Image: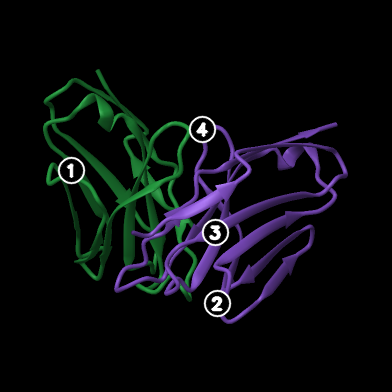
Amino acid sequence: DAGVTQSPTHLIKTRGQHVTLRCSPISGHKSVSWYQQVLGQGPQFIFQYYEKEERGRGNFPDRFSARQFPNYSSELNVNALLLGDSALYLCATQTTGTSAYNEQFFGPGTRLTVL
Amino acid sequence: GENVEQHPSTLSVQEGDSAVIKCTYSDSASNYFPWYKQELGKRPQLIIDIRSNVGEKKDQRIAVTLNKTAKHFSLHITETQPEDSAVYFCAASGVGNTDKLIFGTGTRLQVFP
């Protein structure tokens, strides 16, 4: 059974550009969460989507947006990139929308560098 | 706001010794507490978790304890091995209608042979 996959693996952009990151969940997982991990810090929650609806949003500006597709895969979009957006972007998926009963599995992440 | 504090930030032990990492959470509504191990350049991997209706859980050399009154939970690794060397993150979840994990700042564990 394939794990959570993310694409691309690495990405280099310049300030002001736009980026789209993708996440494919484990088969049967309907919830996708996105996290930003700056070097040396713990992951910070950005979004959660469950059954294609936004379940929660972290303390990130409106430049960050996401969506979930009918096949439960998800995209994270970041507009007007800033140097501070450089980070590892992780997605985590789970069976249902209740982490108290279901483990969240992380993908390998997308390393975004903004120059 | 929601916050998880984690200590220590670095921990060095001799192979075979025990290691203990402690976390404190702020929101009493939290009900799920996972621990993740992250090796350099890799994804966080769940190593053990505990739910609020349990005070202790053990899986071979790893154990977690939870004190809901004190809002405190700890990771215990016994008989440490060099391959245990990594960054460990605690997290808390279960507040509101979202499953967001609030992570601690991480503990870099080094196990010397």
- Measured from the top left, where is residue A50 in percent x and y? 27, 68
Q: Residue A3: tell me if it is visible.
A: no
Chain B shade:
purple
Between the C-alphas of marks 2 and 4, the distance is 31 Å
Question: Are labels 2 and 3 assigned to the same chain?
Answer: yes
Amino acid type at mark 3: Thr
Have a look at marks 1 and 2 and say if they share a chain.
no
- Give the spatial CA distance, label 4 vs label 3: 27 Å
Residue, disc 3: B24
Q: CA distance from mark 1 to mark 3?
A: 33 Å
Q: Is residue B51 left or right of residue B75?
A: left
Decide which of tag 2 and tag 4 comes sooner along the chain: 4
Disc on the earlier residue, 2 or 3: 3
Residue B41 has which mark? 4
**Chain of the residue on which disc 4 is drawn:** B
Name which residue type carries label 1.
Answer: Asn
